[in-house]
Amino acid sequence: MKPVVIQDMTIRFGGTTVLNDVSLSVASGECFGLVGESGSGKSTILRCASMLYKGWTGDVLIGGQSVRSMDPMERCRVLQMVFQDPYGSLHPRHSVRTVLAEPLRIHGIGEQEARMRQALIDVGLPVEFLDRYPHQLSGGQRQRVAIARALILEPDVLFLDEPTSALDVSVQAEILNLLQRLRDEKGFTYLMVSHDLAVIDHMCDRFAVMKTGDIVEVLPRDAILDGTAKAPYAQELIGASLTYEQAAM
Amino acid sequence: MNQSPILDVQNLTVHYGGAPAPSVQDVSFQLGRERLGIVGESGSGKSTVGRALMRLLPSARVTADRMQFEDVDLLGASERKMLAVRGARMSMILQDPKFSLNPIRRCGDQVAEAYRTHVRASKAEARAKAIAMLDAVQIREPERVYDLYPHEVSGGMGQRIMIAMMLLTSPDLVIADEPTSALDVTVRLQVLKILDDLVREQGIGLIMISHDLNLVRNFCDRVLIMYAGRVVEALNAADLDKAQHPYTRGLLAAQPRIGGSRQPLPVLARDPSWTQPQGAAL
Ligand SMILES: Nc1ncnc2c1ncn2[C@@H]1O[C@H](COP(=O)(O)OP(=O)(O)O)[C@@H](O)[C@H]1O
Ligand SMILES: Nc1ncnc2c1ncn2[C@@H]1O[C@H](COP(=O)(O)OP(=O)(O)O)[C@@H](O)[C@H]1O
Ligand SMILES: [Mg+2]
Ligand SMILES: [Mg+2]
């Protein structure tokens, strides 16, 4: 279990400041949400923190260690990312076995077969699925494989970028249940982006509301219903979400 | 339901060429001046129903006992007749305006041109009408927005422009296919409100296709629930929570809710019998 601390993260693309001194901390074992307007920089935070983007300033500490000081192999063992689109994130001509074996091979980890089987069992897929290809899997099954790939190096932290946004609500329920169970069993720390406040409420202890590259407010889950948000945009987002859902108002 | 419905569909079945089975089977409903939601999972056949009504499925086998839009028999009408009906008396609005707008032409010109396709008008009249419509969908500074290119407008603005374009000809039937799924929730509500107001004011019949139960609950009068190409249940939107069909109930239960228990969400257990015909009386 490791905490995540983001300090003064700033990045510009061209002349545009996309993240402006973003700081937040996530306790070890916590599920922390990121919500906000599309284009506000949520995915960019995850991409910077996992060093998919390099040209940013500030720092990210995982378990006290800077992601900048980790070599790529080490970083993969500490943090993994799951993306929104289960169709785009798996190579169409790679079998599930290839997808799961590759990180094990790169990291020189033994007992590959046993680990791959365990990863599939962990995400609730039959072990026979090792020999399937993406086109033979449903959207939910693909997202399970993407999660299995993220698990196989036994990381401490998972960055989840809209992991269920492309899925039907019935399939979303399965994946959210899976993520909750894995956090209980393995003590993962989650940093999770979603545009759906009901998903954030279901999964997260706290969340940050973002607008145009800034965190406008960090709120506990309860603030969604108890009306304690202060930032105008946080109030607007919560108000619209409640109206939309027609929750207790 | 009105005395004479805008749309009367009986046993619509659509079989795509090369597909092993029909994608839509025996779908029946009537539509008055009301908002009808069609909801279901991806692949359940919602968009296919919309495209069949617009006669946009040239390579599929479309059959029905009846598919009547006002005085137009949508099964028998010539393509020439459909060209006069489509985009004029019945219109469709799609999820992503980026794919519907021409990227290299100014938004306003596209609205004005759409007007001139259906109504005899001078360029100046069409421009004035386009600006009035942009104003009607609550776009501030419509003259400025008129001159923007599609990549210069936000998703919510793009969808308002699409709504403006669609309403130019005062259609009687609008089919909206996931019109707000790509929008942020704050913008989504604004766009839905605009659509809703216009539909009510103009007495339009609206078919709202969506995967989102919250949306159809709040913005429709009645709802058809589709599963694997069939309508398994039809309800008043206000009674959605009293749904009887285990599929509808399963979808509702799987939806996380603000202030919910945070217990694992009930997972849908699919039953093969749901794909059997069962003659839901509508
Ligand atoms: N690689 C990039 N190059 C240029 N602009 C980018 C890049 N990545 C993201 N952006 C811009 O940064 C902003 C934030 O994007 P993103 O983090 O994807 O937003 P969100 O995930 O909150 O929707 C957007 O305006 C986007 O266009
Ligand atoms: N052009 C096509 N050719 C063959 N099958 C299609 C075509 N378009 C859609 N389908 C199939 O028809 C079914 C219904 O699709 P669709 O109407 O798009 O569902 P929905 O809108 O509910 O997601 C799906 O199984 C889909 O794969
Ligand atoms: Mg994003
Ligand atoms: Mg569709």
Image: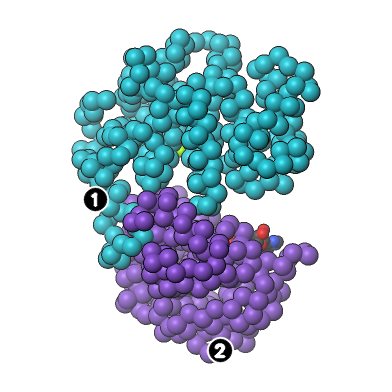
Identify by letter the chain in purple: A
Quadrant for the C terminus of chain A, please: bottom left
Quarter-of-image position of residue A247: bottom left
At label 1, the amino acid type is: Ala
Residue positioned 38% across, 64% down in the render: A225
In the rendered image, the quadrant that contains the N terminus of chain A is: bottom left
Q: Which residue is mark 1?
A: B269
> Would you call the spot at circle 2 few (<14 residues within 10 Å), some (14-19), or many (20 or more)?
some
Classify residue B108 by image quadrant: top right
Q: Is residue A68 left or right of residue B189?
A: right
Q: How is the image coloured?
A: by chain
Residue B180: x and y in percent read: 51, 43
Nearer to us in this view, A146 or A65: A65
Q: Which mark is residue A65?
A: 2
Q: Amino acid at mark 2?
A: Gln
Give the residue at x 38% y 23%: B31
| Mark 2 on the same chain as mark 1 | no
Question: Residue A102, position in %: x, y?
Answer: 50, 70
- Image quarter of residue B245: top left
Indicate the position of residue B207 as horizontal and vertical percent values.
Answer: 43, 30
Towards the viewer: A246 or A7: A246
Residue at coordinates 60% horizontally, 21% vertically from top-left? Answer: B169
The cyan one among the chains is B
Q: Is residue B178 left or right of residue A11?
A: left
Q: Chain of mark 2?
A: A
Give the residue at the far bottom of this rendering.
A64
Marks 2/1: CA distance?
44 Å
